[in-house]
Amino acid sequence: MSFLPLYVTYPSWIHPEIFPGIPVLGLLRWYGLMYICAFVTAFFVLRREMHEGALNDGSFTATEDDIFSFIACGIIFLLIGARIFSTLVYDTSGLYRHKPWLIFWPFDTATHQFTGLAGMSYHGGFIGGLFGMFFWCWRHKRPCFKWIDAMGVAIPAGYTFGRLGNFLNGELYGRITTMPWGMVFPDAEKFSAGLDWVQKFAAQAGMTIQSGTNLVNLPRHPSQLYEAFFEGFVLWLILWLLRKHKKWDGELSGIYIAGYGLIRFVIEYFREPDADIGYRIAKDTNAPIYINTSLLNFSTGQVLCFGMILAGIGIAAGTFIYAKKTNRMLPKKRTA
């Protein structure tokens, strides 16, 4: 009896390069374009908030030049933080610790081919971007958490594009799954076709293993799309609906930080940890990373996200106490 396969094959026409095989234009990559889309989207969302009065504080009125300067400063610090964090926390070779000048070197050291800054960390970007926003507000004498609240609303809308860039790169895919939307990613780890569990798993997914096949590429969760939707669109929608109802400056910052941490923490159970790092905390140190065997096995991302949850709660509580004590609570509803 024949049946339809319960999985999707990653489209063969998708390449990391926008114009693969074309000199010069082949250097343009979807991931870089998605970063541009993310920053532009964040700018337009922040500009909308500016027109609604979210950035005004009685003594001054924000302008487009202000928000452009604010975002540009945040982007510079974000890229620095994302790159440093990626190379020093996620790289296990020790290359960048011994040769730190290579952190921002955009060429492969062996082939000398242009690779761009391959490898960026969200958590490093978050820390760097946050520092950059604090620095800008201090430099321009603007109320920090009023501006960071507004940026917290804008970031998830742009973040959606970053995860779409990961999908177009065919990277950061999830664990193996028999769900009908599971996807076979070309660069994912393959498993021996002779193993009983592989044969059973393939059969459950509706995958036929051809005679003579040695290695099988099993379907995986498209976790990049999960993150794009939940950490991007859904979190943005929540913050967008709350933006006119915040009660104190710093409330939305706390909600964004804790909300992202919570959502990412859950999605990490579907995303495969880095093979060279594995679990940071594990109930079973020998547990495979390609399938979730215990909720007590925690990846690097989950450890960092747990820190974000605590930080978000702390920021929301701290700014609330400060606003209460200094009589800076906001009106119940802000109008445009």
Image: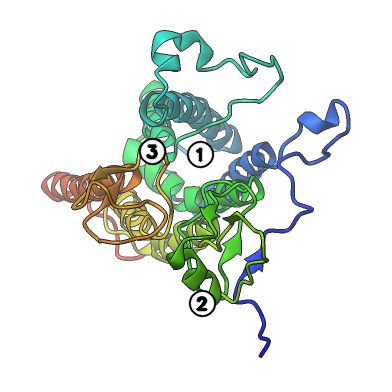
Q: Position of residue 273 (x, y in %)?
A: 40, 46
Question: Residues at badges 1 and 2 in contact (C-beta under 8 Å)?
Answer: no
For image coordinates 35% across by 45% down, the residue present is: 301
Q: Residue 135, located in which quarter of the rendered image?
A: top left
Q: Position of residue 139 (x, y in %)?
A: 40, 21
Marks 2 and 3 sit apart, C-alpha to C-alpha, by 36 Å
Secondary structure under the numbered disc 2 in the rendered image: helix
Q: Is residue 138 left or right of residue 121?
A: left
Q: Position of residue 296 (x, y in %)?
A: 21, 56
* Residue 216 to residue 4: above or below: above
Q: Which residue, given by chain and number where applicable, does mark 2 sit on? A: 204
* Nearer the camera: disc 3 or disc 1: 3
Closer to the N terminus: mark 3 or mark 1? 1
Q: Which residue, given by chain and number where applicable, does mark 1 sit on? A: 62
Q: Amino acid at mark 2?
A: Gln
Task: Look at the image and tell me in which quarter the N terminus lies.
Answer: bottom right
Nearer the observer, 265 or 312: 265
Q: Which mark is residue 123?
A: 3
Closer to the N terminus: mark 1 or mark 2? 1
* Nearer the camera: disc 2 or disc 3: 2
Residue 120, visible in the rendered structure: yes
Q: Amino acid at mark 3?
A: His
- Residue positioned most to the right: 22
Q: Is residue 265 left or right of residue 159?
A: left
- Residue positioned most to the left: 325
Marks 3 and 1 sit apart, C-alpha to C-alpha, by 29 Å
Nearer the observer, 107 or 207: 207
Question: Residues at badges 2 and 3 in contact (C-beta under 8 Å)?
Answer: no
- How crowded pointer 3 is (Cα within 10 Å; few <14, some 14-19, many 20+) is rated as some
* Residue 266 to residue 62: above or below: below
* Nearer the camera: disc 1 or disc 2: 2
- How crowded pointer 2 is (Cα within 10 Å; few <14, some 14-19, many 20+) is rated as some
